[in-house]
Amino acid sequence: MAADSTPPADDTRVRARAAALLRRPKLWLVPTVLCGLLAFLLSLLYMGGIVNPNGELRHLPIGIVDADQGRPLPGQTTNLGTQVTRSLTGAQAQDRLASGKIYGALVVPADFTTTAAALTTANATTRPTLTVLTNPGMGSLGSSLASRITQQAAQQASLAIGMQLMDSPATAGADATTRLVLADPVAVATQVGHPIGDHSGLGLSAFYYTLLLVLAGFLGGNVISNGVDTALGYADNEIGPWHARRPTVPISRTQTLLLKMAMTAGITVLTTTLVMIATVGILGMDASHLPLLWIYSYCASLAVGLGVQAINAAFGGIGQLVSMFVFIVLGLPSSGSTVPLEAVPGFYRFLSLFEPMRQLSVGVRAILFFDARADAGLTRSWIMIAVGAALALLFGLAMTRYYDRKGLDRLTPQPSRLVAQKT
């Protein structure tokens, strides 16, 4: 039946009152269940990934560099540096810091054994020093965890070396002050192994920039979807007290999806440009490789927008909730950008294998902090963007073509005239 905005002259309709509707249990059921479920799941998923990073810490990659060239102490077969570590060479550690493969490193200097041995003689001038290198580009928490772990390792090494020095015959007659120094002989210095800019949010700018790209794609996709549905007459347009519905345009679900995806591709050019103008141009965020950053940002945000359109086309009204979980709710705790993946429960490490925000954040971090190196994760990010965009196209078109073949039209076409009323 065609809708008519002009009520009959003898209109005696009785309008419902809120107080009466509040007493209907069925009206409460769906919103209550959905809101409660959302609050419960959001709490579990968000807080579950960050409440216990120390307890969940597993295999945080840290380099140990042995450059010690000193001769072994009396009674020992290896020098102190070899005893502390048998791991990486200095060049390997620096390369891994610069490619974001390790969160920090512990460096044993070339004169470590010589300086330590001198403590037992009258020629002692300084304490041997172990250097802890941090990698702030991996995030402030990850770098902090690595620094704490390496400092603890250095302290344990110092106590072990002290026991060897105390057992040396040369210290048998040492005074109390000297023996106190020898019991814990190693000093620990901390310095930045791979510096980043001052306007990098202590290593968090990559995460927040990625979040901007995801939000731009997610919100933009939903705005475009709703705007198209309103313009084609498949959704109501309500602004304040005014309500209107445009004439319904006969169009298939597949053609509607193609229209929305094409508009997403066009509008994302604007949103990506504005994101870069705001963050780099106005706020002064440290960023290099700007042309590459723009192209990457566009493709990343577009892949999210295409995914939103596909999910909305497949799931209809609840599509926005589904896409929110896919791109944001599950993406934030599994991104590895704020809390390292080595310090979160296994469930989030599993999600990180395919969750979009993780794939995108690694690429942004590589461009911003690691000189856009392919082995810093940029290649994998490009591959995952391509895979994500392809899956969005295939899934969305497969679902809409299926609905079209089944004759599942969205709405029965209405008369070609505007229906509007003031509520």
Image: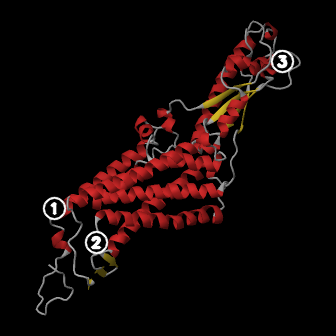
- Residue 76, how many percent across, how many down? 73, 8
- Tell me which residue sits at (39%, 46%) in the image: 45
- SS of the residue at dot 1? helix
Q: Quadrant of the N terminus?
A: bottom left
- SS of the residue at dot 3? helix
- Residue 388, how many percent across, how many down? 44, 49
- What mark, if any, has residue 294 been given in the picture? none
Under mark 1, the amino acid is Lys
The Cα–Cα distance between marks 3 and 2, rounded to whole angstroms, is 84 Å
- Tell me which residue sits at (68%, 48%) in the image: 196
Badge 2 or badge 1: first in the primary sequence: 1
142 vs 155: above or below: below
Under mark 2, the amino acid is Tyr
Query: Which of the two residues, 49 or 247, is positioned nearer the viewer here?
Result: 247
Would residue 356 appear left or right of 63 to someone viewing this image?
Answer: left
CB under 8 Å between discs 3 and 2: no
Q: Pointer 3: what residue?
A: 118
- Residue 21, how many percent across, how many down? 17, 70
Q: Pointer 2: what residue?
A: 234
Would residue 383 appear left or right of 85 to someone viewing this image?
Answer: left
- SS of the residue at dot 2? loop
The Cα–Cα distance between marks 2 and 1, rounded to whole angstroms, is 26 Å
**Quarter of the image holding residue 35?**
bottom left
- What mark, if any, has residue 26 been given in the picture? 1
Q: Quadrant of the C terminus?
A: bottom left
**Crowdedness near tag 3: few (<14), some (14–19) or many (≥20) residues, C-alpha within 10 Å:** some
